[in-house]
Image (tube, rainbow, N blue to C red):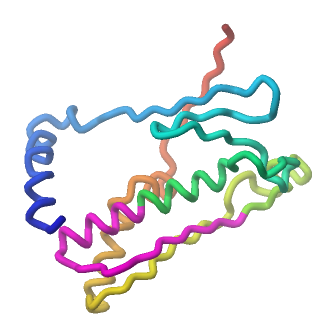
């Protein structure tokens, strides 16, 4: 896909959102079903069933997916798609690219071993290795815009308002 094709595809959508801002607000959803035999949760990804369980550092077998890994995978997927879309829009040709995310966890927090240890990632690092003839100035712009428009990156970066409920059936 080239920049003109992308603009042509997105132009009517952008116009609709400018005319009717409420049309741009869409609720994405995910759900999972608790496994009645194991410490696991079955999550429908839209393409396949993913079974998330405990990380081996918390007593898991490693047979199930770790939700922390899934978070990093979502970041990589979103950042990669955003990078490619922005590069296309800017006319920057990327011959190849690798997106990597890694994060540091202190499992003492999630296991309740140390109340001072954080629960969750204390640091997340996202990197892009690209094969391109683009100038450093173009790459700097590409990185800035990828950060700005990557939904998962911005969600992690700006902490949305959260609400949690529990319902008994």
> Could you tell whether 7 is left or right of 86 in the image?
left
Give the x, y percent position of residue 8: 8, 55
Relative to 141, is 36 above or below?
Answer: above
Give the residue at x 26% y 72%.
87
Relative to 93, is 135 above or below?
Answer: below
Give the x, y percent position of residue 34: 70, 26
Quarter of the rendering containing residue 83: bottom left
Relative to 141, is 81 above or below?
Answer: above
Quarter of the rendering containing residue 114: bottom right
Give the x, y percent position of residue 20: 13, 34
Give the residue at x 74% y 35%.
40
Q: Residue furthest top?
A: 169
Give the x, y percent position of residue 167: 64, 14
Question: Is residue 3 found inside the magenta-colored segment of the image?
Answer: no
Q: Residue furthest right?
A: 113
Which part of the image, by quadrant, shows the C terminus? top right
Q: Nearer the viewer, residue 115 or 166?
A: 166
Quarter of the rendering containing residue 133: bottom left
> Could you tell whether 51 is left or right of 95 in the image?
right
Give the residue at x 64% y 26%.
33
Q: Nearer the viewer, residue 49 or 84?
A: 49
> Could you tell whether 75 is left or right of 149 in the image?
right
Tell me where the magenta segment starts and ends, as one range: 79-104
Relative to 1, is 18 above or below?
Answer: above
Badge count: 0
Which part of the image, by quadrant, shows the N terminus? bottom left
């Amino acid at each position: 896909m080239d920049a003109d094709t992308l603009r042509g595809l997105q132009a009517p959508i952008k116009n609709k959102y400018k005319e009717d801002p409420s049309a741009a607000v869409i609720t994405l959803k995910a759900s999972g079903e608790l496994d009645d035999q194991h410490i696991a949760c079955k999550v429908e990804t839209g393409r396949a069933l993913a079974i998330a369980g405990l990380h081996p550092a918390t007593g898991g077998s490693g047979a199930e997916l770790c939700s922390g890994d899934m978070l990093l995978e979502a970041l990589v997927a979103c950042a990669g798609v955003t990078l490619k879309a922005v590069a296309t829009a800017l006319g920057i040709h990327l011959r190849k690219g690798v997106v990597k995310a890694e994060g540091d966890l202190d499992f003492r927090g999630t296991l309740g071993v140390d109340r001072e240890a954080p629960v969750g990632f204390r640091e997340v690092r996202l990197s892009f290795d690209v094969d391109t003839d683009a100038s450093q100035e173009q790459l700097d712009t590409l990185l800035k815009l990828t950060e700005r428009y990557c939904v998962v990156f911005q969600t992690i970066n700006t902490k949305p308002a959260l609400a949690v409920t529990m319902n008994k059936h």
